[in-house]
Amino acid sequence: MTIDHDAVLRARVLLLGSGRRSRAELVDAYRVLAEVNPKAYGPKLVDALLSLHYQSRNPEMDVTLTAEAARAAREIEVGEPKRTERLYRALNAHQVSLFALGRRAEGRAVCEELAGAGLSDPLTRVLAEEGRFAEAAELDEAAVRDGGSDHLFWTRLRWAANLEGAGQHDAAAVAFREILAETRRKAAEQDTSLAILTWESVHFSRMRDAVGDGAGAAAARREALGVLEELASTGEPKNWSCILGWWKTLFVLSGRAAEPAASPESPMPPFGTDHEWSRDVREGFLGMSAGLEAEAAALRGAHRLPELVDVQRRISIRAAVRDGDRPYLFEERFAPYFDEGVTLARRTPDDRARLARALVDRSMFFVAARTFEPAHADFAEAVGLLDTP
């Protein structure tokens, strides 16, 4: 290797100088110095490249910077402090930048490398996006059984969703019952919100309805109704910070069956998680809104109310994806979607299932908005529709 001693000197002078150095200047300096002293400057090069990437607004440049950061991270000697953490950050940033450009095959390969290094969440997401639910569920099960996840609730929820997507409904029910049992325990100890217990019970009822388990669905609804009665009469025992992520994730998951099936050629969102959807998938899902609005207008004009109710729900779900965890003006922004859903469903009096679904949707929205009395009223009406012969 030929060393450019002048370049090395300039890099050292830059780093020793007292002036303010740009991120690009630091990257240039560490590139040079990492050639002569990789042990000392390789980790700093990784950090500098990622810092420059976070500043960038150029998707193509993001791919270039993160690819270089990944190469530099791989070259850090095994055993060096924070090598694994730097490798995770570099590879994760690289896969995100690849998916942002729709380069899914390359992004998936990086996710597989991450999984091999011990971080499986990105690969789980990609597999779910491509409809490979059984494989995704296997990774989730390993993460849950390991117990090392920082977000164990969300991993369990994703696991149940992926099992359900794979058609393993009994296993999905077992996994979700574990979530419910833990939430019941924590709610009894006032360690979690009664709203979360309500959303989870309602989601479990939907899971059981989907497989024809009417008794199981009715029992879950009764539990939810009992919690709603408590909320309507006394409110939450404690004040909680923003918990809208639970409502948003479960509401969006409830709409998966109405969407096109996911495949490697036509990926869909990884329903069951609110975290780190691939950018191309998120943008594609939200990009369907204009077409759905046009379809809704045509259905309205043709007075095809049942189909209109279904399309309006898909529109509402995309609104939740966009803004469902933002508390500012939450009720004002979302009430029109759910009010319209109920209004349209009431115009189809012979379709009890659609009306009940619209009422449940609005009830759970009211819970999210902390408006518990109308939440209880809507849900009680829905239970009457569903559980009365």
Image (cartoon, helix red, strand yellow):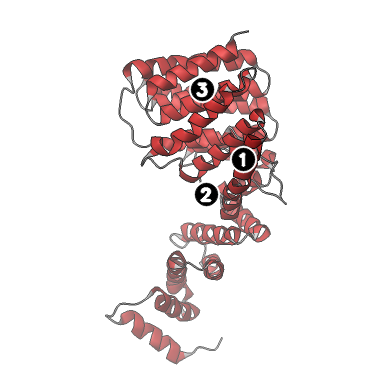
Q: Which residue is mark 2?
A: 276
For badge 3, the amino acid type reads: Ser
**Disc nearer the start of the sequence (3/1):** 3
Out of 227 and 30, give the one closest to the viewer: 227
Q: Secondary structure at mark 2?
A: loop
Foreground residue, 40 or 303? 303
The amino acid type of the residue labelled 1 equals Ala
Dot 3, how many residues are within 10 Å of its Cα: few (below 14), some (14-19), or many (20+)?
A: many
Of pointers 2 and 1, the one earlier in the residue sequence = 2
Judge depth for marks 3 and 1 and give the one in front.
1
Give residue 297's mark.
1
Q: Nearer the viewer, residue 320 or 45?
A: 320
Task: Please tell me which residue lies in front, 66 or 304.
Answer: 304
How far across and down, in percent of the image, does residue 59 sit? 54, 66
Q: CA distance from mark 2 to mark 1?
A: 32 Å
Residue at horizontal 65 percent and vertical 40 percent from the top: 298
Residue 95 shows up from this direction: yes
Q: Residues within 10 Å of mark 1 (few under 14, many from 20)?
A: some
